[in-house]
Image (cartoon, rainbow, N blue to C red):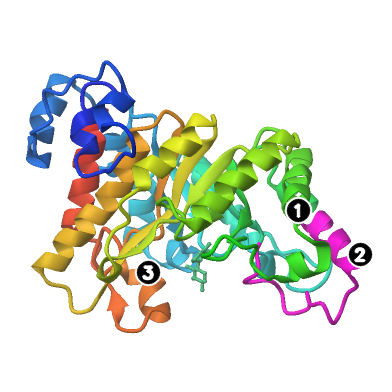
């Protein structure tokens, strides 16, 4: 359904190299080319659905699952937060609790408590889980250093970590962010403990081990600043082709989608998503938030709404984009103010869980595509 009648509308403002968006999906009618988001409800009325007003209901039938990162402390302590996670989303991603430093605080000592709680919550609410993340340079346990281990030992530790973690969640995690942030902005491999100790093949190894532990899970690469066409996404495109030629089980390309309106919005997202889509690879927006320099004003709120929508529209316009996940849905628990000085208001709901225009925009775009 999603790339039929409204493709031209969804493509408004999305640059597509070498072709118009409409011709990228032949046969797409364009009666809504001039439509504004406000017309969503009349369109939805023509195609009745049970709509409780949630993002989840709006996404139904589009082929794109809508998700959020979950803060486990908030899930335990904050009832309205918990209710909103259950009501609004099809998928959940643990914001921190599947990271290596959390699941293996001491060598060989696992703590799956919080991650298991999220998996149970997802099951109760008929949600899928995106696992995050298996090999990364950040949030590793303090004992995991090159001073403590030889390269051969580090390789054995990474193998065991992946087999044990993916094995623990076998059949319970829909998609894994296997390798996170492995390239620099210029497309060179990021200098990490893994690259230094194991060389560039650690990425292929990580995917093979994850697949061995859960052959049904979808296995993703994941990074930021890789949404548009640039040196970093070019490096991923080359890597994917190389991995697949070598028979490595890589299934998806994840774009985090941490945007900041003061830097402008990426303008080649659809072109980029399309090239991965044409390889038959699944794509996903995995950590979307759109931050701004505080205080917010009407123009910034408008730019933010466009930022959230731009990524969703690109996702809806290709065949194999499987999910769109926000990195927290309320400013109450967003990571942004703690990390980016003077910035915030990056999520679709405010600190009181009241929807912002970005939320309404996402809902209307989903409804148009359904
Ligand atoms: C962030 C979390 O949101 C914070 O709570 C934590 O302190 C640091 O990590 N890219 C990723 C995520 O892949 O795991 C990061 O999450 C945000 C950037």
Q: Where is residue 343 in the image (x, y as percent from the top left)?
A: 30, 77
Residue beneath disc 2: 152
Give above or below for 36 relative to 95. Answer: above
Q: Which residue lies furthest to the top in this view?
A: 27
Q: Mark 2 vs ligand 1: CB under 8 Å?
A: no
Q: Which of marks 2 and 3 is in front?
A: 2
C-alpha distance separating marks 2 and 3? 38 Å
Q: Does the magenta stretch include residue 143?
A: yes
Sequence-wise first label, 1 or 3:
1
Mark 2 and mark 1: Cα distance apart in space: 16 Å
Point out the stretch of residues depicted in magenta. Answer: 136-162
Report if residue 99 lies within the magenta region.
no
Quarter placement of the N terminus: top left
Which comes sooner in the sequence, label 2 or label 3?
2
Q: Reading the chain from its start, which is encountered first: label 2 or label 1? A: 2
Identify which residue is drawn at 13% across, 34% down: 40
* Mark-to-mark CA distance, 1 and 3: 28 Å
């Amino acid at each position: 359904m999603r790339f039929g009648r409204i493709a031209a509308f969804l493509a408004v403002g999305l640059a597509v190299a070498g072709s118009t968006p409409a011709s990228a999906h032949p046969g797409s009618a364009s009666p809504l080319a001039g439509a504004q988001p406000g017309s969503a409800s009349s369109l939805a009325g023509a195609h009745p659905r049970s709509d409780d007003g949630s993002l989840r209901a709006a996404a139904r039938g589009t082929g794109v699952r809508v998700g959020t990162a979950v803060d486990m402390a908030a899930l335990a302590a904050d009832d309205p937060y918990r209710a909103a996670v259950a009501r609004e989303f099809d998928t959940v991603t643990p914001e921190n609790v599947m990271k290596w430093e959390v699941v293996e605080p001491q060598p060989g000592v696992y703590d799956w408590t919080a991650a298991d709680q999220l998996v149970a919550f997802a099951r109760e609410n008929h949600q899928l889980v995106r696992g995050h993340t298996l090999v990364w340079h950040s949030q590793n346990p303090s004992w995991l250093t090159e001073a403590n281990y030889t390269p051969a030992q580090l390789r054995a530790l990474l193998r065991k970590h992946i087999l044990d973690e993916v094995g623990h969640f076998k059949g319970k995690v829909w998609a894994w962010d296997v390798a996170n942030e492995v390239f620099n902005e210029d497309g060179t491999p990021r200098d990490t403990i893994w690259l230094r100790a194991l060389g560039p093949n650690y990425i292929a190894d990580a995917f093979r081990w994850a697949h061995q532990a859960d052959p049904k899970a979808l296995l993703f690469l994941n990074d930021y600043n890789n949404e548009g066409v640039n040196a970093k996404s070019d490096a991923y495109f080359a890597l994917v082709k190389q991995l697949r030629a070598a028979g490595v089980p890589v299934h998806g390309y994840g774009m985090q989608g941490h945007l900041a309106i003061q830097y402008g919005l990426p303008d080649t997202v659809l072109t980029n998503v399309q090239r991965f889509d044409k390889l038959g690879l699944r794509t996903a927006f995995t950590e979307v938030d759109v931050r701004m320099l505080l205080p917010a004003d009407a123009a910034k709120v408008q730019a933010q709404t466009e930022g959230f929508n731009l990524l969703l529209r690109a996702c809806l316009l290709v065949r194999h984009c499987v999910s769109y996940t926000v990195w927290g849905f309320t400013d109450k628990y967003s990571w942004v103010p703690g990390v980016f000085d003077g910035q915030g208001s990056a999520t679709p709901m405010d600190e009181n869980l009241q929807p912002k225009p970005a939320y309404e925009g996402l809902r209307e775009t989903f409804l148009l595509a359904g």
